[in-house]
């Protein structure tokens, strides 16, 4: 299962169909959210809004409620009536729960609880899984905590550990890793720094909750021209070298060349 959606994934409440097309136009893909963004009493109408949606199915993700919840089966029944086949499973904790998805589905599994993070490796190994995402707030809530970040915006250590574990589990199985949302919409500098760290660390995308965040995320994932020029030059220089070599004052080996290839793949 491949991941080809682009770096900026925008959440949109599934009970706000008037926003669907606009959200999709502003982002690389839209996540129609049947879970936390929708009150319990509005979930049935939200499902019908997804069924009625006329959107490019290749750029739509539907977030469903957790497996084992009262809404999970109803969510899957609604998705089956649509052309949408990329599903984000909230609070994923058990790889076996993903067996309900047929071969035409690809799953983005949210590991956002203590159990989910601990099970990230087995979840990433599931054949339907195309990627893993983590979530800071649900994770801390599952531990009985009250805040994932310090007052200055930095993640607490437990969140940083979970982020790294989900990224490593995804990478170990050749799956995409999606970084968590930045809840402070006005903190554009913080989002830019976080997105830059995400791409440098190996995340393939970052989820967001407001259209203003989309261009910031895209800019972080898009290499600048100087960086691309360096990547092209070092790969060209490698063609005439054997093994490790010196380039622009730096020792270059195969891991560095892989970094350069990754940069060009994002151009």
Image (spheres, rainbow, N blue to C red):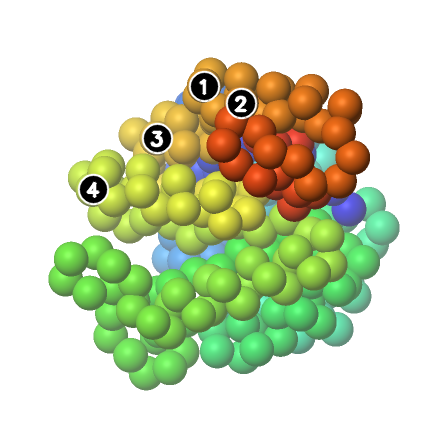
Q: On screen, 120 above or below 227?
A: below
State left or right for residue 33 relative to residue 193: right
Secondary element type, mark 2? helix
Q: Label 1 belongs to which residue?
A: 226
User: Which numbered disc covers residue 230?
Assistant: 2
Secondary element type, mark 3? helix
Q: CA distance from mark 4 to mark 1?
A: 27 Å
Q: Label 3 belongs to which residue?
A: 216
Crowding near the residue tagged with mark 4, few <14, some 14–19, many ≥20 C-alpha atoms within 10 Å: few
Q: Position of residue 17 (x, y in %)?
A: 45, 33
Q: Could you tell me which residue is drawn at 58 percent across and 40 percent down?
A: 251
Q: CA distance from mark 2 to mark 4?
A: 31 Å
Q: On screen, 130 above or below 229?
A: below
Q: Position of residue 25 (x, y in %)?
A: 47, 21
User: Which numbered disc covers residue 67?
Assistant: none
Q: Earlier in the sequence, mark 3 or mark 1?
A: 3
Secondary element type, mark 4? loop
Of badges 2 and 4, the one in the foreground is 2
Disc 3, disc 4: CB below 8 Å?
Answer: no
Q: CA distance from mark 3 to mark 1?
A: 19 Å
Q: Label 4 belongs to which residue?
A: 187
State left or right for residue 68 relative to residue 162: right
């Amino acid at each position: 299962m491949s991941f080809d959606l682009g770096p900026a994934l925008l959440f949109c409440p599934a009970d706000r169909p008037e926003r669907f097309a606009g959200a999709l136009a502003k982002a690389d893909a839209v996540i129609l959210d049947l879970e936390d963004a929708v009150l319990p009493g509005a979930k049935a109408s939200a499902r019908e809004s997804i069924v009625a949606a006329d959107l490019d199915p290749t750029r739509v993700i539907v977030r469903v409620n957790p497996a084992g919840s009262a809404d999970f089966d109803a969510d899957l029944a609604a998705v089956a009536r649509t052309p949408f086949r990329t599903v984000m499973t909230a609070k994923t904790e058990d790889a076996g729960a993903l067996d309900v998805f047929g071969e035409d589905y690809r799953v983005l599994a949210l590991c956002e609880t203590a159990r989910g993070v601990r099970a990230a490796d087995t979840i990433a190994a599931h054949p339907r899984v195309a990627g893993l995402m983590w979530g800071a707030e649900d994770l801390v809530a599952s531990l009985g905590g009250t805040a994932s970040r310090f007052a200055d915006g930095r993640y607490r250590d437990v969140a940083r550990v979970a982020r790294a574990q989900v990224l490593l589990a995804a990478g170990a199985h050749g799956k995409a890793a999606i970084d968590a949302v930045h809840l402070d919409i006005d903190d554009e500098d913080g989002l830019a720094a976080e997105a830059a760290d995400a791409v440098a660390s190996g995340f393939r995308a970052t989820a967001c909750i407001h259209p203003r965040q989309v261009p910031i995320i895209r800019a972080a994932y898009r290499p600048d021209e100087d960086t691309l020029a360096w990547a092209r030059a070092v790969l060209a220089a490698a063609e005439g070298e054997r093994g490790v070599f010196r380039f622009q004052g730096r020792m270059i080996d195969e891991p560095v060349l892989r970094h350069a290839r990754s940069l060009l793949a994002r151009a």
